[in-house]
Image: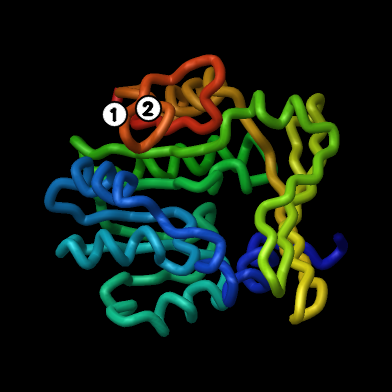
Amino acid sequence: MSDWDASTYGERAATVYDEWGSPTADSIAFLAELAGPGPVLELGLATGNVSLPLAERGLDVVGVEPSLAMIEQLRAKPGGDRVRAIEGSLLDVELDERFSLVFAIGDTLFLLESQGDQLHAFERAAAWMADDGAFVVETIMPWILFERRPFVVVDSIEPDEVRISVGQFDAAEQRMSFAHVALGSRGVRLYPFRGRFALLGELDLMAHMAGLKLRERWAGWRQEPLAAQSRRQVSVYERA
């Protein structure tokens, strides 16, 4: 994909992103409790479907997002101006503030394409955290990828549209290439993304190198215990 960059997925998917699901009340409650009085920083803002509900709770929320199209969807929402959206990569933007909560959820960390970039994300999150702040990372559990070489999954079947997900991965390089594909009355639309997955021990090591340590880890936003068959994980890091 010769024209690929960090904003490709967002530029293509912005107008349909919210159709694919919304954050749960449990995720908003989990993040709000960690945030305390705020302020809050989201890495990978998308359309603000997580940050906006936090702002509606009275929190001061900042979000970093590489896709202008995603930010425009946020700004078009009622109350969208409550979230201060910053266009740019989380690897490059400059912020002088400190936050009680920094979070990168929905596989945002895995959308970075190298270990160096992922480590840099941990370092930047640590620099932006208040002394008693927290950094939340939520991702897929990589074992799910190991059973799919490559894979095609039917996401939904509606009268006027079928959505599927296709993907492949390179275990040796820990690289992932995926696409959501929609087929229907609006034609065939492709929403590609790629990145790099990391095992939990590797995430914890990157956190350690950034001066952080694991506070707690769960299988979901309801604080379900992590088990061998858990499909997602939520990690909360604090200063070491």
Nearer to the camera, 221 or 136: 221
Q: Amino acid at mark 2?
A: Gly
Marks 2/1 in contact by CB < 8 Å: the verdict is yes
Q: Quadrant of the C terminus?
A: top left
Mark 2 — residue? Answer: 211
SS category of the residue bearing label 1 = strand
Residue shown at the point (22%, 49%) measured from the top left: 32
Q: Position of residue 34 (x, y in %)?
A: 22, 41
Residue shown at the point (66%, 57%) measured from the top left: 156
Name which quarter of the figure residue 219 lies in: top left
Left/right of residue 138 with respect to residue 20 in the rendered view: left
Residue 6 position (above or below residue 129): below
Q: Position of residue 175 (x, y in %)?
A: 75, 37
Residue 125 position (above or below residue 209): below
Mark 1 — residue? Answer: 239
SS category of the residue bearing label 2 = loop
Q: Quadrant of the N terminus?
A: bottom right
Left/right of residue 128 with respect to residue 186 in the rendered view: left
Nearer to the camera, 186 or 9: 186
Left/right of residue 196 with respect to residue 65 in the rendered view: right
